[in-house]
Image (cartoon, grey):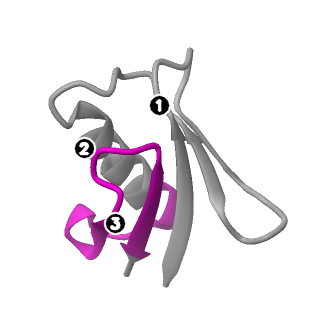
Amino acid sequence: MRKQVRVKPNAKQNRVTEDADGSLTVWLSVPPVDGKANVALIQLLAHTYGVPKSQITIVRGHTGRLKLVDIG
C-alpha cells in the first residue's frame, strides 16, 4: 500500500497518526541530517505496521518533509 507521509523531525517523541484522508503524520525525534530521519521513519513504520524494514521504501520525497512511502 502507498501512503502519503508528512514528517516532522526534531520532535520530543516518535509518533504516528493517520489523518482522515488516509495520509500519515509522523513525528520523529531525530534531526533531518544525513538521512537519519529517513532511517528512523522506515524503522518506525516497520514497527507500526509489523513488517520488516526491507518491505518499506520511500518512493518520492527523500529530501523533503512530504514523502510517498510504499509499505509491504
Q: SS at mark 3? A: strand
Q: Earlier in the sequence, mark 2 or mark 1?
A: 1
Which residue is the site of mark 3? 60
Q: Using residue 47 as the reference point, say whether residue 5 is left or right of it.
A: right
Q: Disc 3 versus disc 1: distance between alpha carbons?
A: 18 Å
Q: What residue is rendered at 49% in x and 84% in y? A: 1
What is the tally of numbered marks visible in this picture? 3
Q: Are marks 2 and 3 in contact (CB under 8 Å)?
A: no
The residue closer to the viewer here, 11 or 13, is 11
Q: Quadrant of residue 13?
A: top right
Which residue is the site of mark 1? 28
Q: Earlier in the sequence, mark 2 or mark 3?
A: 2
Residue 25 placement (x, y as % from top left): 63, 48
The verdict on residue 63 being magenta is yes
Residue 59 placement (x, y as % from top left): 31, 71
**Disc 2 residue type?**
Val
The residue closer to the viewer here, 15 or 65, is 65
**Disc 3 residue type?**
Arg
The residue range painted magenta reads 48-70
Residue 29 placement (x, y as % from top left): 44, 22
